């Protein structure tokens, strides 16, 4: 039986208002306080990080961000430094989400630099990796995953994965309602763990690998039951308190 504690993370993306997040957090923290096996994390848009830091202060729910600059400070209009997130009690930062890779041209090296910057500031990166539909259909899934993972191993070193989380998010499953089958997800999760194990077995065994992509209240349990799936990174369903709580309660 795995000793890895499951993590269920809500990625709110660019959604919500001051009013709606107050209601959402109240409902989620109420549900979480009634007990869950999972570690629960919320990642709001930047501007709500400070507000959430206050709302979550007396709860067991952790706070994270969806992105960060790879740089420490300076003339970078519109960017947010890792130290600023740390100032507001962020513990986790998502790096390399496919929406950042595709819509904001973040490449493997930039993602690796962000991963390092997050750790250098005492926070835990959640490294997102995943293939496009064309890549899966042309049997390139493992090649893409290996490339995205190796770029970070090369720059940060394998030991950096002792304080990191990986999220496998097949791009074709994000926001489409088309979840990977449990078999498809487990196969890639196992591949990721084996890839890390080529460098260090213990690190590979210890790292948490989340699945993301249309995780819903009615499919979370069958995904979270699998040997190499240690929780989920949840988009749409994390904006609905009851659905998100059902997902939190679905961990093994
Ligand atoms: P959905 O759960 O909306 O498919 O989004 C997944 C995701 O991108 C989480 O980071």
Image (spheres, rainbow, N blue to C red):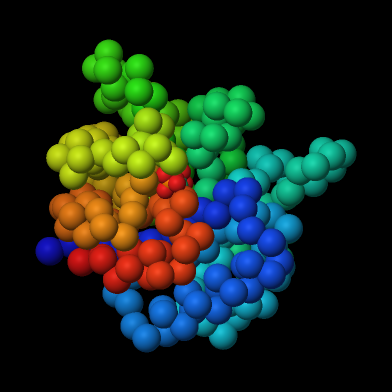
* Image: 63 above or below 127: below
What is the x, y in percent for residue 73?
80, 46
* Image: 108 above or below 139: below
Q: Residue 85: name its quadrant.
A: bottom right
Left-right relation of 88 to 184: right
Question: 72 or 106: which is nearer to us?
Answer: 106
Left-right relation of 34 to 122: left
Left-right relation of 195 to 225: right
The quadrant of the picture occupied by the N terminus is bottom left
Question: 117 or 234: which is nearer to us?
Answer: 234
* Residue at 51%, 39% in the rendered image: 97
What is the x, y in percent for residue 113?
58, 37
What is the x, y in percent for residue 59?
52, 82
Residue that protrudes farthest toward the top in the picture? 138
* Residue at 25%, 54% in the rendered image: 219
Q: Residue 175: name its quadrant.
A: top left
Q: Residue 39: name its quadrant.
A: bottom left
The quadrant of the picture occupied by the C terminus is bottom left
Left-right relation of 117 to 150: right
What is the x, y in percent for residue 125?
50, 50
Give the number of callouts: 0
Q: Is residue 26 visible?
A: yes
Residue that protrudes farthest toward the left in the picture? 1
* Residue at 55%, 30% in the rendered image: 101
Q: Is residue 39 visible?
A: no
* Residue at 59%, 41% in the rendered image: 114
């Amino acid at each position: 039986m795995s000793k890895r504690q499951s993590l269920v993370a809500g990625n709110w993306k660019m959604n919500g208002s001051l009013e709606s997040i107050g209601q959402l957090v109240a409902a989620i923290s109420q549900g979480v306080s009634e007990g869950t096996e999972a570690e629960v994390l919320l990642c709001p848009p930047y501007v709500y990080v400070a507000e959430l830091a206050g709302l979550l202060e007396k709860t067991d729910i952790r706070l994270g961000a969806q992105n960060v600059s790879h740089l420490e400070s300076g003339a970078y209009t519109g960017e947010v430094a890792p130290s600023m997130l740390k100032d507001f009690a962020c513990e986790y930062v998502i790096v390399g989400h496919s929406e950042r890779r595709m819509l904001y041209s973040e490449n493997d090296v930039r993602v690796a630099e962000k991963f390092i910057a997050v750790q250098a500031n005492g926070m835990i990166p959640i490294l997102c990796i995943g293939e496009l539909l064309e890549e899966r259909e042309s049997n390139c899934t493992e090649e893409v995953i290996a490339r995205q993972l190796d770029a970070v191993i090369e720059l940060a070193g394998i030991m950096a994965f002792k304080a990191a989380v990986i999220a496998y998010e097949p791009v074709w499953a994000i926001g489409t309602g088309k979840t990977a089958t449990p078999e498809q997800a487990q196969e890639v999760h196992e591949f990721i763990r084996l890839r890390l194990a080529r460098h260090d077995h213990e690190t590979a065994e210890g790292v948490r690998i989340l699945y993301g992509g249309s995780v819903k209240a009615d499919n979370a349990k069958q995904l979270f039951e699998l040997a190499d799936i240690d929780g989920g990174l949840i988009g749409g369903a994390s904006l609905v308190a009851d659905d998100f709580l059902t997902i939190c309660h679905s961990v093994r």
